[in-house]
Amino acid sequence: MTGAMADVQKQPDHRNLAIDKVGVKDIRYPVTVMDRAQGSQQTVAAVNMYVDLPHHYKGTHMSRFIEVLNRHSQDINLKNLHSLLEDMKSSLEAGRAHIEISFPYFIDKRAPVSQARALMEYMVTYRASLENHLDLVVEIKVPVTTLCPCSKEISSAGAHNQRGIVRLAVRITRFIWIEDMISLVEESASCQIYSLLKRADEKFVTETAYANPRFVEDIVREICLKLEHYPAVTWFSVEAENMESIHNHSAYAFIERHKNGGY
Amino acid sequence: MTGAMADVQKQPDHRNLAIDKVGVKDIRYPVTVMDRAQGSQQTVAAVNMYVDLPHHYKGTHMSRFIEVLNRHSQDINLKNLHSLLEDMKSSLEAGRAHIEISFPYFIDKRAPVSQARALMEYMVTYRASLENHLDLVVEIKVPVTTLCPCSKEISSAGAHNQRGIVRLAVRITRFIWIEDMISLVEESASCQIYSLLKRADEKFVTETAYANPRFVEDIVREICLKLEHYPAVTWFSVEAENMESIHNHSAYAFIERHKNGGY
Amino acid sequence: MTGAMADVQKQPDHRNLAIDKVGVKDIRYPVTVMDRAQGSQQTVAAVNMYVDLPHHYKGTHMSRFIEVLNRHSQDINLKNLHSLLEDMKSSLEAGRAHIEISFPYFIDKRAPVSQARALMEYMVTYRASLENHLDLVVEIKVPVTTLCPCSKEISSAGAHNQRGIVRLAVRITRFIWIEDMISLVEESASCQIYSLLKRADEKFVTETAYANPRFVEDIVREICLKLEHYPAVTWFSVEAENMESIHNHSAYAFIERHKNGGY
Amino acid sequence: MTGAMADVQKQPDHRNLAIDKVGVKDIRYPVTVMDRAQGSQQTVAAVNMYVDLPHHYKGTHMSRFIEVLNRHSQDINLKNLHSLLEDMKSSLEAGRAHIEISFPYFIDKRAPVSQARALMEYMVTYRASLENHLDLVVEIKVPVTTLCPCSKEISSAGAHNQRGIVRLAVRITRFIWIEDMISLVEESASCQIYSLLKRADEKFVTETAYANPRFVEDIVREICLKLEHYPAVTWFSVEAENMESIHNHSAYAFIERHKNGGY
């Protein structure tokens, strides 16, 4: 060992194999994200950052990913992911850069009758890649109430219902509000979910769900139809998963579509 | 390095501090457990094994835990945990031994109307310790249907319901069947859960749940009362957790009781 | 409600949207799988089963998935997944069927010096689909030891090392032993991992890892090269993830390749 | 259903069973916590809130927990948990109140040689109860590097090392800085962990770990000894868990002590 330390990563590699993605995974970092109601929101993200590695290099420099994250964490939004990825490409001397940022996002929601307010959590993930052009996918996870149409139809009273989780991923060519995507999903379920419900609200959500039975199949179809009206979305996948109240497993439905061309 | 390798763990330690538990954690191992209907059942367990360490030793010999597990994994049941713990004490030269064994346990269940059969999973944990006498706790995790009494009462139709998870831990002085503990829990819920339900069954479980609304509070109380009739149980704790269909968080209730003496 | 219950799922749907996948998710079930050393092995699987749903049906019949699983769970292997999927297609009246079966798989391993034996766990997933032809992907998760080449090179003594997890997924056209895939991965790491190591073994694995430093980049490249010799593999992806001993996040590398044609 | 909705929870219960804890679990909420360097820090917490329920009431009012959380989430710290719990007691008309708040806490750390800065995550949990007096436990989870003394001793070169997780819980009678507890743990390991390490730093942490071999047994003992100097701590438990680089399971040690009186 001497004063000039060897740069092992920069050493040549003779296996002639480029690597698709190399980098750091599962870093947790505080980030500031864009919020329609308040301008910005502080939250905590789980972050993965990768670049490609040309065949002639032995390794990448992992510490540089953290330095890039450090420079950009105070302002994470769909509009500046492009510059973050540019920074990754130049700092890592790479041809392609990928980032995945997942964070809980909170919306101040009013209960449907009492108007009582509390924050409701939604999980959001940005997946962005840059080679020559930016590829941007936004994924949201929305908890909803689902009430079974079959159970309602065949039973003399009541109907089984449960918490469902809807995951919607959209590839976009223009900015889109997370809040709009969440509303689109919530309107497709038997009823939306709240953090805070007073008794009058509980009556409302119970009756609303009972009046709007939905299979997981219905939910993914409804979301599909609504997404027709979003030209900014060029591709999407949607999955609905019910934590069935009558089973110990989930009911599941999944649709994926490229928007140019018909269904 | 010489032919006779140093036994670092056996070296004296001068900090004068005994250690309560030292050992191995999160080993996954195939085990054969006792099954009331079939005699035995093969499953896969997550196992933790610990002993105490006297203050004068630097460390324990971790490999011996695996050797003990190897010797006993083909016949794990409440009746022979005592000899497994004796083996740990002598192999590790320890005064106390602890083992925790968690495994999915499957029961062949018939649907309530169609009598269609399928296996239903329950998580079971044995926690056993041995110093001078054996201390034995059995814990089961039972998924159930819960239907909200308040929602039923105040709503013109329907009632929110969901999957609930009940965790019951009992300290026992005599053998007890897992199957009996599971039934006791299932009878305390709005309705029990099945892997396989045909349409006539779905009607039955929907109507049964609607006819038997239960808060988490009701469930833990019902189980408490039923446990009065089990003299083999000297202590228990029971918790009910509802994955609320109308919220993104759980409703929760917990009772812990020593049985000798009143509540 | 009358004696003849409505079949809500069979009702026509007018949204004109076929669904890619609909079914059941996260069922846990005991299964018997093929084992090279012993013929068969009993374990516990997490299972997802889906079919496509034509646009004119409102829903699928979820209970039938469990009935199919019940019929086949006693003999799950790469050779008969085809007939399981055929059964799904006919039972569910579907054009495509998908199944994902994940299970811990145990191999009786001998320690490198002492030859002491214990079972070692590997996670295995079969992903199989059937429309006109069978598509079969096998995924294994192999824990390994990785020792950092850079840390070894620049440090006067020692080198940081850690547990790494390698995930290898292969699309195959012919039968392949899980055991061979696992060996291929283990030979590409700094050292393989064991459940049971006596002191002479610990010396061996420490020195072996120190003699074979590997970045995550090296591991995925080595596996890539070895897979050239498996004509049964038409596509693969391999990822290596190090739970870095010096960081609270992972180092990660990923390569995906279609085998026909060069890299 | 009439204008005046029934208050089902307030109805009398005749089972004569008080409930130890009833409330809400796994709510995620943004909170502002106290930070020694910056005054305050915004993060996201997972929160459980419970009260006791007297035997004569059927249920508790779950929505009130969320209202209390809402009122206090902007200023969560050890100094004002007392008033939060008082608010729970009065809002829920209860004799005892319990809260558990877990959150990632970030500290701006400098690398040991390069002095490069990045945020490092630690998980912190406050567990507080109030009946007549306040009971306060702070738990931290600190990732560290551990290097095996036995492996170093018996091997001709290198030594296996890995990421370890230390969990320290302290019951305190006076305010204590999270930052001090974290330092106490980090000083007891083979080396501390950083988010960002340049090459000179990697050399430093590799050599530091090699110079300071520690079993899990050593780590819990070292922490034990250091806690003697904290009179504010009346009870503690400490566990060290190594994600062994040579095994697929963990090595584990645990000590629990009441401070009044000797060990």
Image: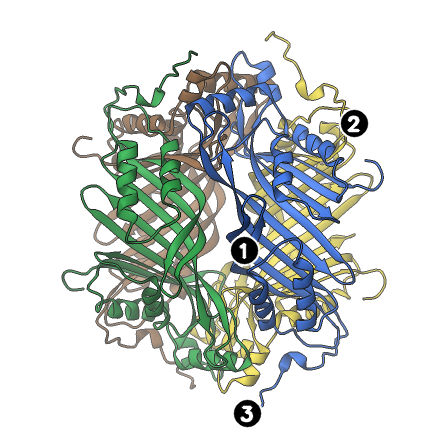
Chain colours: A brown, B blue, C green, D yellow
Residue B256 visible in the picture: yes
Q: On residue D16, which mark appears?
A: 2
Q: Chain of mark 1?
A: B
Residue, far top:
D2
Q: Nearer the viewer, residue D27 or B117?
A: B117
Whether callout 3 and callout 2 share a subunit is answered no
Q: Earlier in the sequence, mark 1 or mark 3?
A: 3
Q: Quadrant of residue C87?
A: top left
Q: Nearer the viewer, residue D130 or C169?
A: C169
Q: Nearer the viewer, residue C124 or C117?
A: C117
C-alpha distance separating marks 1 and 2: 42 Å
The kind of residue on which mark 1 rests is Thr
Residue A166 visible in the picture: no
Quarter of the figure with the C terminus of chain A: top left
Check whether the beta carbons of the residues at disc 1 and disc 2 lie within 8 A of each other: no
Q: Which residue is mark 3?
A: B3
Quarter of the figure with the N terminus of chain A: bottom left
SS at mark 2 in the image:
loop
Q: Is residue C53 left or right of residue C39?
A: left
Q: Residue at x 38, y 14 (%)?
A: C4
| Residue B94 placement (x, y as % from top left) | 72, 70
C-alpha distance separating marks 3 and 2: 70 Å
| Residue D76 placement (x, y as % from top left) | 65, 43
Crowding around mark 3 (Cα neighbors within 10 Å: few <14, some 14 to 19, many 20+) is few
Q: Which residue is mark 1?
A: B32
The kind of residue on which mark 2 rests is Asn
Q: Is residue B48 left or right of residue B118?
A: right
